[in-house]
Amino acid sequence: MPARSRQTTSSAPADAPSQSVTPELREWIIAQAQAGFQAPVVLQSMLDAGWREDVAAHAMEHVLRDHLEALAVQQGQPPASRVPEPAVGESPLFIDVGDRQVEVLMSMAQPRVVLFGNLLSPEDCEALIAEAEPRMARSLTVATRTGGEEVNDDRTSDGMFFQIGENAVVRLLEERIAKLVNWPLENGEGLQVLHYRPGAEYKPHYDYFDPAEPGTPTILRRGGQRVATLVIYLNNPDKGGGTTFPDVHLEIAPRQGNAVFFSYERPHPSTRTLHGGAPVIAGEKWIATKWLRERKFE
Ligand code: PD2
Ligand code: ZN
């Protein structure tokens, strides 16, 4: 037998007759995590002490999450919100969104990023572009200082917004998104379509509203913070135009019908959701962006 002593936790507190999480168990779990023990090792010690597996796993997850949340708030970070989450826990290859099987192509925990394939057909993409094209104008970003909108050199695309449910293809996409990420359709902002020509880009930024900016309280009156984004690729640029996550050196290829989802449980860089649209090198790039709020967007 290989020596196991360095991989063994102190004994877990004995199981409570009710199998409920006792304060003693809570403290013990936090101490094991602080000592650097990995989750499976801590779990095994709890099983050895008589805890039921489902209770032990649930206790670990909740105790550690609550502990990390308390630490984050203690350090001055804003509190965490509930965020949309696609049902990828058991690593399905597809998610059924009612009228379509959406492919799950990649999933990352931190930052929370999930890449989907086949969210839209080429015909859906073309219909969205055709509806958007006559209404395109130089993109504005929210001016967080005032809560209004302004032209911004960091974003050299053209864009437009659809109203919620404005036409058949918008409705179809919104319904698919709501099922895909388990979030009420009414919490979504209107779909935005963006068009990038060669050289156009969207420099790295966060999609949440900076709590330190004076205009943010006004923006938050319409549905609270943004908590997740879905960038949907409507065509295939020839070169460039990927969606980048510089903190984790990740680049998503902009492939027609695919979509990248990412969520941020608090408006803070610790979410590592800094992201940008890399310059288009050849061809053009069309995307639709869906931003999801905490509550109904009105
Ligand atoms: O076009 C993109 O890839 C991109 C990158 C970053 C879009 C957005 N952000 C956005 O619309 O928020
Ligand atoms: Zn963005």
Image: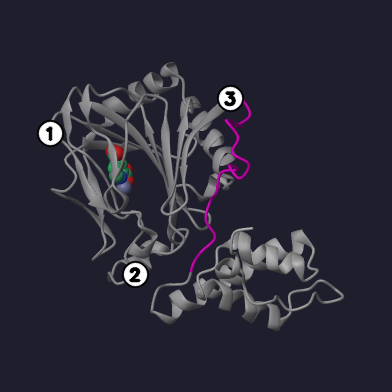
Q: Which mark is residue 100?
A: 3
Task: Give neighbour class at mark 3: few <14, some 14-19, many 20+ (Cα, 10 Å).
Answer: some
For marks 2 and 3 on the same chain, the one whose residue lies earlier in the sequence: 3
Q: Residue at x 55, y 68 (%)?
A: 37
Q: Residue at x 25, y 28 (%)?
A: 285
Q: Nearer the viewer, mark 2 or mark 3?
A: 3
Range covered by the magenta-colored residues: 80-99
Percent x, y of residue 3: 59, 64
Location of mark 2 (residue) = 211
Instruction: Give the Cα separation between the discs numbered 1 and 2.
Output: 31 Å
Q: Choose between 86 and 43: the one closer to the eye.
A: 43
Instruction: Give the Cα separation between the discs numbered 1 and 3.
Output: 35 Å
Numbered disc 3: secondary structure? loop
Instruction: Give the Cα separation between the discs numbered 2 and 3.
Output: 38 Å
Percent x, y of residue 118: 48, 25
Dot 1 and dot 3 residues touching (CB under 8 Å):
no
| Marker count (numbered) | 3
Dot 2 and dot 3 residues touching (CB under 8 Å):
no
Q: Amino acid at mark 3?
A: Arg
Per the image, is 85 magenta? Answer: yes
Secondary structure, magenta segment, majority class: loop
Q: Which mark is residue 199?
A: 1
Q: Quadrant of the N terminus?
A: bottom right
Per the image, is 179 magenta? Answer: no
Q: Residue at x 38, y 79 (%)?
A: 76
Percent x, y of residue 96: 62, 30
Percent x, y of residue 117: 46, 28
For marks 1 and 2 on the same chain, the one whose residue lies earlier in the sequence: 1
From the viewer's perspective, is 209 left or right of 178? Answer: left
For this orientation, the residue located farthest to the top is 123
